[in-house]
Amino acid sequence: MVLYRLIFIFMPVVIYMAFMWAPPAAILGDASRILYFHVPVAWVSVVAFIVSGVQSILFLVTENRRREREYMAYNSAAAGMVFTILTVITGSIWAKLSWGSYWNWDPRETSIVVLMLIYIAYLSLYSSLKEHPNRGGISSVYLIIAMITMPFFIFIIPRIYSSLHPDTIINQEGKIHLEPAMRITLFSSIVTFTLLYGYIYRLMNRISRLEIKAEEKHYDI
Amino acid sequence: MQSRIFKNLRKDFLIEFRNRSAVNISFAFAGITTLSVSLACGGATLSPQIHSVLLWIIIFFSGMSGLSHIFIREEEERTSLFLALHSDPENIYLSKLVFNIILFSCITALVTPLYLFFMQVVPAYTVYFILTAASGSLAISSITTILGAMVAKAESRSSLFTVISFPVMIPVLWISIKLTSDSIEGGAPPELRSLLFLLAFSGVIISVSYLAFKFIWTEQ
């Protein structure tokens, strides 16, 4: 799709904007530029998780295209896992620069680690059900149960425990505390990384489709 | 519906009563872990937070050792097909859930007084402490019942159960540890909204599990 090919133009532009065009933040200086990579990968981790969950719900409630939905849920979780690892790495670098240590078990740090653990658990469950005929059904239910625990992490626990993490984009005031150039760069980066995820996800789905076709052909022979 | 649930529950209790190995192992595990922790601490003065962390680690691993058993037994003894023919998935889920809640409440009722006795801990807010233990146990039982049904169908069950339970259980452990620490320490008046969080969490998990259980139990 042409839309996804736009990342070949957008990505270099976003990298240029992040390092050259956007001004450094007041206290952190140039170290704050990690914001343009950390926030988008965190966003994509959650998007991939939601896509996985939605595909799992569709797998359970619809009768058609079930095999396709099963690998679409799996592929989104596998792509999301990579983005979650990138979020943890960029987040810990940022934590070291602003708080002095790589890991503090801040509620926001914990929530992304939990998301990573959910992905690991889902992929482990999926692989251990390799021979089971109801593999798609069981792993879909796990993803749905995991998905309903996420709002507790994202919205409730950070309000019970105090956090050092800067305000998220979706904050209680509903305001974004960034200069216009920084805001444009951040949103461009979020769009670009979302397209990157879409591009990778589409490629993974095509590979799975080809694998299934090859498998079916093999059985026909 | 109620009679089917009651019959299933009665069957599970009878089987457990005849062959007490699994329940005995769960209780022995809980007791031995509590004694080992108190022996290792050897009368050291620990902060309320450390007490709370140790208590919930013991409760968590006691749950891991016994709560998936109820479904694994059906698969190992090859009775799951007969059970599926006899009862609706919803009835099976509710009976197993009630069984796990009763079993885990007993484990918590064993571990908590033992821990308080050996570690010489006196909670400042006793009622709040008991309510936290009860709500935390309910939340853990509700999660482990549905996850136990999943691992019963998979390979390498015991290790997989811990791997898939831990991420979903973290909110419960996190809040329970904080509430237990507050109730041991005293000071500020107890926060009821955190207790409500545990109950709401259990309610959400039980509702979704009730709706989704048939997708695990019957092959699609």
Image: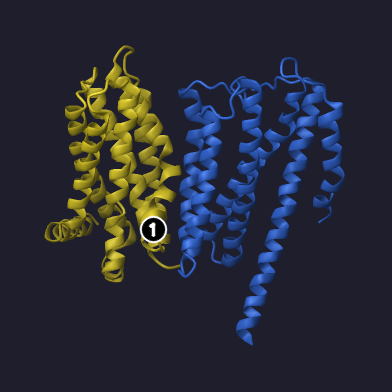
Chain colours: A blue, B yellow
- Determine the image quadrant of residue A208: bottom right
Front-most of A160 and B159? B159
- Determine the image quadrant of residue A30: top right
Q: Residue at x 56, y 57 (%)?
A: A58
Q: Secondary structure at mark 1?
A: helix
Point out residue B91 in the picture as x, y percentages from the top left corner: 28, 57
Q: Is residue B39 left or right of residue A91?
A: left
Front-most of A201 and A51? A201
Above or below: residue B150 compared with residue A216:
above
Which residue is identified by label 1? B151
Q: Is residue B134 left or right of residue A14?
A: left
Q: Amino acid at mark 1?
A: Val
Q: Residue at x 84, y 54 (%)?
A: A2
Above or below: residue A109 compared with residue A200:
above
Q: Is residue B11 left or right of residue A167?
A: left
Point out residue B53 in the picture as x, y percentages from the top left corner: 34, 30
Point out residue B24 in the picture as x, y percentages from the top left corner: 17, 51
Front-most of A179 and A99? A99
Q: Residues within 10 Å of mark 1 (few under 14, many from 20)?
A: many
Visible residue check, residue B91: no
Callout 1: residue from which chain? B
